[in-house]
Amino acid sequence: MMNFKKSPAPVKSIEPEEARSYINGRTEGTYTLLDVRQPGENQLTRIPGSKLIPLPELADRINELDPEKPVITY
């Protein structure tokens, strides 16, 4: 399992409105919008431009994320 304490950047919780404001104030591609829900949930509703990596797979697929970009996870 991934050790979040060794994360290169602090992990911060934000409210949905803060996330929306952050996204609206930046160019797509300068951040990663990460969906950690299951594929069935993602098929029902998804945010355009998001990347799906279900939470149980995240430790094995973490290298798919650009460490230089901020990540907003939902």
Image (cartoon, rainbow, N blue to C red):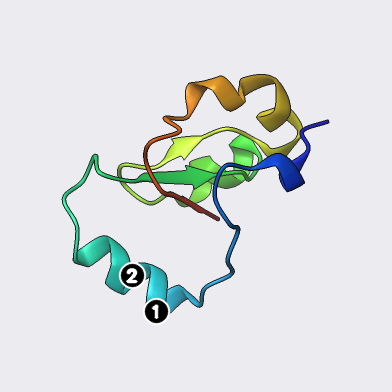
Q: Give x and y (percent) for residue 55.
A: 70, 39
**x 51%, y 35%: residue:** 52
Q: Are marks 2 and 1 in contact (CB under 8 Å)?
A: yes
**Spatial distance from mark 2 to mark 1, Cα to Cα?**
5 Å
> Disc 1 designates what residue?
17
User: Based on the displayed image, in which of its 4 quarters is residue 19 positioned?
Assistant: bottom left
Where the C terminus falls, by quadrant?
bottom right
16 relative position to 22: left or right: right
Q: Nearer the viewer, residue 32 or 39?
A: 32
Figure check: 35 above or below 20:
above
Which residue, given by chain and number where applicable, does mark 2 sit on?
A: 20
Q: Which residue occupies 71% across, 40% down?
A: 6
Image x and y of residue 61, in percent: 62, 22
Question: SS at mark 2?
Answer: helix
* Towards the viewer: 34 or 45: 34
x 49%, y 22%: residue: 64
Residue 49, image x and y in percent?
31, 42
Task: Please give the name of the residue rendered at 64% of the width and 43% of the height, measured from the top-left corner.
Answer: 7
Image height of 5 relative to 11, above or below: above
Is 68 on the left-hand or right-hand side of 10? left
Work out whether 21 lies above or below 28: below
Residue 46, image x and y in percent?
43, 49
| Mark 2: amino acid | Arg
What amino acid is at disc 1? Glu
Q: Count neighbours of disc 1 (C-alpha within 10 A) and say few if under 14, some if 14 to 19, many if 20 or more.
A: few
Q: Is residue 33 above or below residue 11?
A: above
